[in-house]
Amino acid sequence: MNTIRVLLCAGTVALAAIALPASAQYRDPAPVIAAQREAMRPLAMLDGVWRGTATIHRPGAEPLVSPHTERVGPFLDGSIKVIEGRSYKPDGSVAFNAFAILSYDPDKQAYNFRSYAMGHANDFPLRPTADGFVWETASGPATMRYTTVIEDGAWHEIGERIVPGQPPVRFIELELQRVGDSEWPAAGAIDPR
């Protein structure tokens, strides 16, 4: 019986080592986490609770304006940033809900924006700017570019459809004000006792 336990334990350890990427095997995580935390520092301006409007620009129709909120906070000792966005219908029910994780890979020296929305999950390269960030995704012949600027407690984000040889077409705009701090998502961890 003890031999079986030892073999099972050894097999589990071996499988865990195989499952890890080669770069993660036998590596002290402290310097990696420190580099990730440092890379998140310029994005600290996003932390908190934000409220305002989301405007959807529709060709040939009036813009659709909805109440919108964002909440942003650091997680995993500040090595990643977590974002949740919600747009609301006139009756107060949720019309749109998205969740995202901003991370940094020190080996690649690149930021990643992992987004979950409307039944889809995707990874996008993210580029911090002096006053916010930009991320893009290909959509057929077009590029969808999202540019966020944070200034004086205001969050202004635009989404544009960019087709080579044509002027950008704005399809969404967020106008939000910072309304307070948040302990989300770190608050509420389960006590070990």
Image: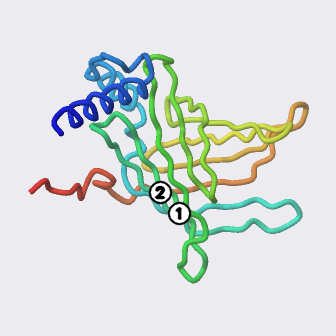
Which image quarter: residue 91?
A: bottom right
**Residue in the picture at 84% in, 40% down:** 140
In the image, 184 versus 12, the foreground residue is 12
Q: Amino acid at mark 1?
A: Arg
Q: Is residue 126 left or right of residue 44?
A: right
**Residue in the picture at 27% in, 37% down:** 77
Q: Considering the image in quadrants, where does the C terminus appear? A: bottom left
Checking the image for residue 86, the label placed there is 1
Residue corresponding to mark 2: 70
Label 2 packing within 10 angstroms: few (<14), some (14-19), many (20+): many
Q: Secondary structure at mark 1?
A: strand
Q: Earlier in the sequence, mark 2 or mark 1?
A: 2
Could you tell me residue 57's position as x and y percent?
A: 76, 59
Q: Amino acid at mark 2?
A: Glu
**Residue in the picture at 70% in, 38% down:** 137
Which image quarter: residue 80?
A: top left
Q: Considering the image in quadrants, where does the N terminus appear? A: top left
Q: Is residue 6 left or right of residue 178?
A: left
Using the image, determine if residue 112 lies above or below residue 68. above
Using the image, determine if residue 183 lies above or below residue 127. below
Which image quarter: residue 5?
A: top left
Q: Secondary structure at mark 2?
A: strand
Outermost left residue: 193
In the image, 165 versus 117, the foreground residue is 117
Could you tell me residue 114's position as x and y percent?
A: 54, 41
Could you tell me residue 186's position as x and y percent?
A: 28, 50
Could you tell me residue 103's position as x and y percent?
A: 45, 34
Q: Is residue 119 left or right of residue 15?
A: right
> Are the residues at dot 2 and dot 1 in contact (C-beta closer than 8 Å)?
yes
In the image, 11 versus 119, the foreground residue is 11
